[in-house]
Image (cartoon, grey):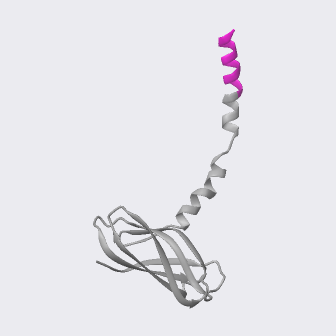
């Protein structure tokens, strides 16, 4: 009778699996990482949070990972805030001292450009590394 119990439990589970459509629920979380990852010259910027600074200008915080294959004594980054047409709304700069290959550190981007609300896109560039 135990074999019948197992068969009865397996029979309802088999038709239930094809009727469940989890791929539609998984699609939105996969889009988020694609949107918030930027990279240039072996450096990757993730977890970017852009906000209005205390003086009413743009500021941002993100995590930068050194994937260049070598340690960097100092690296300077630039983050451009772009409108829908690709025009630059603001430029922010950050630096990271002494980052080993494979290491991830927090970068604080600062700007003197006035903050504006909007659905912006971002361009991340490495402006210098030594």
Q: Nearer the viewer, residue 102 or 123?
A: 102
Q: Residue at x 29, y 68 (%)?
A: 71
Q: Nearer the viewer, residue 119 or 86?
A: 119
Q: Is residue 2 above or below residue 113?
A: above
Residue 77 rendering spot, x and y as whole percentages: 42, 79
Q: Relative to residue 58, is residue 45 drawn left or right?
A: left
In the rendered image, the quadrant that contains the C terminus is: bottom left
Q: Nearer the viewer, residue 23 or 130?
A: 130
Asked whether 21 falls inside the magenta stretch, the response is: no
Q: Relative to residue 86, is residue 71 drawn left or right?
A: left
Q: Residue at x 71, y 26 (%)?
A: 12
The residue sitting at the top extreme is: 1
Q: Nearer the viewer, residue 25 or 50?
A: 50
Q: Residue at x 35, y 64 (%)?
A: 67
In the rendered image, the quadrant that contains the N terminus is: top right
How many numbered marks are there? 0
Residue 129 rendering spot, x and y as whole percentages: 32, 78
Residue 50 rendering spot, x and y as whole percentages: 58, 76
Residue 55 rendering spot, x and y as whole percentages: 61, 89
Q: Main secondary structure of the magenta part?
A: helix
Q: Which residues are magenta?
A: 1-12
């Amino acid at each position: 009778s135990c074999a019948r119990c197992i068969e009865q439990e397996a029979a309802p589970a088999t038709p239930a699996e094809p009727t469940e459509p989890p791929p539609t629920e998984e699609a939105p979380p996969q889009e988020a990482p694609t949107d918030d990852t930027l990279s240039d010259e072996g450096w990757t910027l993730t977890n970017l949070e852009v906000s209005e600074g205390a003086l009413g200008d743009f500021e941002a915080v993100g995590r930068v990972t050194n994937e260049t294959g070598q340690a960097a004594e100092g690296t300077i980054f630039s983050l451009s805030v772009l409108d829908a047409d690709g025009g630059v709304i603001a430029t922010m700069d950050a630096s990271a001292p002494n980052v080993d290959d494979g290491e991830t550190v927090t970068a604080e981007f600062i700007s003197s450009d006035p903050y504006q609300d909007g659905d912006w896109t971002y361009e991340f560039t490495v402006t210098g590394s030594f």
